Amino acid sequence: MSRITLDKLLGIRYPVIVAPMFLISNTKMIKAALDNGVTAAFPALNYRTDQELRAAIQEIKSSTDKPFGVNLIVNKSNPKYKGQLDTLVEMKVDFIITSLGNPREVIERCRPLGIKVFCDVVDLTYAKKVEQLGADALIAVNNRAGGHAGKLAPEELVKLLTENCTLPVISAGGIAHGKDLKQSMDWGAAGASIGTIFIACHEADISPEYKQAMVDYGEKDIVMTTKLSGSALTVINTPYVQQLGTKANWLERILNNNKTLKKYAKMIIAYRGMKQVEKAAFGATYKTVWCAGPAIEHVKSIRPMGEIVKALTTEFELARNLVEA
């Protein structure tokens, strides 16, 4: 069944979302992406206060009328959820990407205002649930995604969702080149959410050491850890990560599996993990925990955001034109 592609859905030139990346995405990156024909989103949790979140949204809106979005964690691990949703609705962002929870309230509040809601999904069961709730698109998080990855391969997940759901499917994970984007769309995807290749951009306010690690390390250096957030997370296998280990310890496992303590444990572990990642992102030390996906293999230099976007979209145009020719 034919369905709308991401570029048509949002009115942009290319079917690409620069993915929201915790502690990395910022207004400079968003504006550079919008200036080059794609859209982008940032995590609401990248801003500590409501005032800072509002200022970021206003800064982007004042410089462009192109659509952009915000990622919202909708479960109990985010105590700021309600206030953040109020702000996003009030300021009428173009779309919200929901993660790690039930998006019912987000969808119900956004639909009357024309704010689109895209939901992170890793399997068909959850995809069907959010489809029934009225989501506008599915973000298909596969096993090559950076950060919180899924379990299914990119092709398998895209085809599973497109064959069983009516919503547009946006592939997330493993895309580094325009030909990868074209391949995803050949499988049936409406577009792609792409993150890792943008980490080592000039505009990112992370340490030079983090950016250089994106160049120096490769796909073989990416490992899964459950130490930071309680959920599987892909990180660079630095000496510190090797020392720390990648499996949750006995206390973390007990807290995560105890029905009474679970919601409190999730908040504690998520908070502790975020602080570890934050320290690594902004102050290079021996103890570094740097998030990235397998697409790190294709990061060869630190470049301006616009240059990375242009390389991706030019390759995509070439791949698309070759087929049409």
Image (cartoon, grey):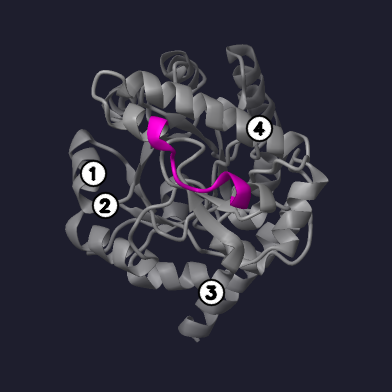
Residue matched to label 1: 126
Horizontal side, residue 229 vs residue 151: left or right? right
Q: Check disc 2: other Cα within 10 Å, few if <14, some if 14-19, many if 20+.
A: some
What amino acid type should be assigned to the residue bearing mark 2?
A: Asp
**Which residue corresponds to mark 2?**
123
Res 302 → quadrant: bottom right
Alpha-carbon span between mark 2 and mark 1: 6 Å
Describe the element under mark 4 as helix, strand or loop: helix
Give the number of the mark in front: 2 or 3: 2
Tell me which label, 2 or 3, sits earlier in the chain.
2
The local crowd at label 1, few if under 14, some if 14 to 19, many if 20 or more residues have their Cα within 10 Å, is some
Magenta segment boundaries in residue numbering: 242-251
At x 58%, y 68%, the residue is 220
Image spot of residue 21 (x, y percent): 58, 41
Residue 179, label in figure = 3
- Indicate the amino acid at tag 1: Tyr
Which residue appears at 44% of the width and 73% of the height? 183
